[in-house]
Image (cartoon, rainbow, N blue to C red):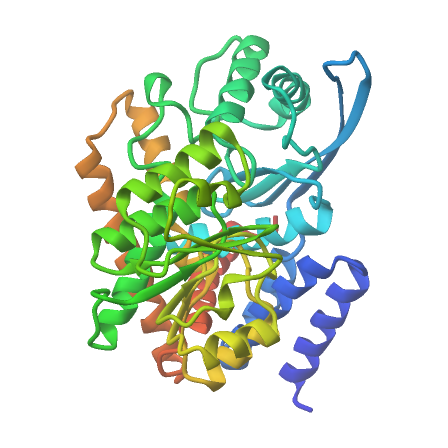
Amino acid sequence: MSATAEKIASVRANIRRRDPGQEEFLQAVDEVFESLTPVFEKDPKYIEVFERLVEPERQIVFRVPWVDDKGVQQVNRGFRVQMSSALGPYKGGLRFHPTVNLSVIKFLAFEQTFKNSLTTLMMGAGKGGSDFNPRDRSDREVMAFCQSFMTELYRHIGADTDVPAGDINVGGREIGYLFGQYKRIANNFSGILTGKDLRWGGSLIRPEATGYGCVYFAQNYLAHKNQTMEGKRCVISGSGNVAQYTAEKLLQLGAVPITFSDSNGYVLEPNGFTQEQIDHVMELKNVKRVRISEYCAFSETAQYFQGKKPWEVPADLAFPSATQNEIDQEDADTLIANGVKGVFEGANMPSTNEAIEAYKKANVMFGPAKAANAGGVAVSGLEMAQNSQRLQWTREEVDSHLERIMKDIFDSSLAASQKYDLKDDIQAGANIAGFLKVADSMIHQGCV
């Protein structure tokens, strides 16, 4: 074994020793490590930089006490992992979900580092959240939780320090409650959160950005293969913000979105969702906050499959837009057998490493999350720029920036993969391009 190979093995072993049991985080690190091996072999100085990068600059864990509508005290755990400030203020969302723990937040923050680097905007990386579940909670309970959460978090964030945003179960309502509490405590109105309402500092296209951006990324990949979106049948998982706007943009580009899902099952429109039907899904999920199965009362053509995943439906393209590890190797094999030629990740790390290997063996186009779903944080960065200018750009301006950024991300990922003789391995290219920008910045800034 060469000296470089020994060093790579040593660093990998140290990471696993330091964070035993953090399965999601270690999975994310392993995926990137494999892609970066050609970089390490060509220039071993980057091995030590990577070892420093995987250790967060700061990890904050705190108690979140609050009182429910019955007057009963509840206690949740809050997290903020500030991963890297090499390129700018920490930037990344907040997730409220029972599955949230330190490993999940670290994996999200680690992925965010590469994603934010790829956008070309000056943003560092962080991620946060809580094991609080807002499902079936009243607005007052959600407000009480958010106010308690921000009462601790406020001391760690700022427009030039750390700018959180939304993620799973953190939408406009939660952002509003969090911002209001920050403003009350800090006596300061500044852009300390993104995803804000348009009336008090938000950006047009922000709600649509992750879904739209994922479709723009897929469009660029298809163009590279001399194909278009026209007529492509697309299976989508999830039914939240990302899934909704993925479907909307697919429809606009001539594709045929045919599924939405939640944790209970999926709904299929055999002839594709119309805009009216997508609007109804938005009402069900964003306003009424009910299960996707309720959609069948609206549509005579819809079919609902309890306890199933949409990957069993024959299609051309797949857009996993729900949560991490929703596609394992068995699901990937099912997708491939059903004719899927491209998988574009709207969620964060929705495919296991085994699923990704299956895509590659079958020559399936693969848009990894850190590249394909970077549209959300890209427009968050544009929202920060608008806040700094005290201006609001037009919808057309923001959408034009988003479309350009997603093309740049695809192009830089492709160029990096080709530079290291990896053909059009976009997954490896995205990891390499994102890493090198952060790593070179860390070298320039010294051992800090």
Could you tell me residue 204's position as x and y percent? 29, 32
Q: Which of the two residues, 179 or 241, is positioned nearer the viewer here?
A: 241
Indicate left or right for 357 with 130 as reference.
left
| Any part of residue 44 in sight | no
Query: For the view shown, which residue lies furthest in the bottom direction?
Result: 1
Q: Which of the two residues, 207 or 430, is positioned nearer the viewer here?
A: 207
Could you tell me residue 432's position as x and y percent? 45, 68
Residue for point 55% across, 41% down: 291
Q: Is residue 423 above or below residue 16?
A: below
Could you tell me residue 365's position as x and y percent? 38, 74
Residue for point 74% across, 17% down: 68
In which quadrant of the rendered view does residue 60 lie? top right
| Any part of residue 373 in sight | yes
In which quadrant of the rendered view does residue 208 lie? top left
How many callouts does the rendering have? 0
* Quadrant in which the N terminus is drawn: bottom right
Indicate left or right for 334 with 255 as reference.
right
Could you tell me residue 83's position as x and y percent? 60, 47
Query: For the view shown, which residue lies furthest in the front direction?
Result: 300
Residue for point 49% across, 86% down: 361
In which quadrant of the rendered view does residue 269 lie? bottom left
Q: Is residue 140 above or below residue 239?
A: above
Q: Which of the two residues, 236 or 377, is positioned nearer the viewer here?
A: 236
Q: Which of the two residues, 429 or 49, is positioned nearer the viewer here?
A: 429
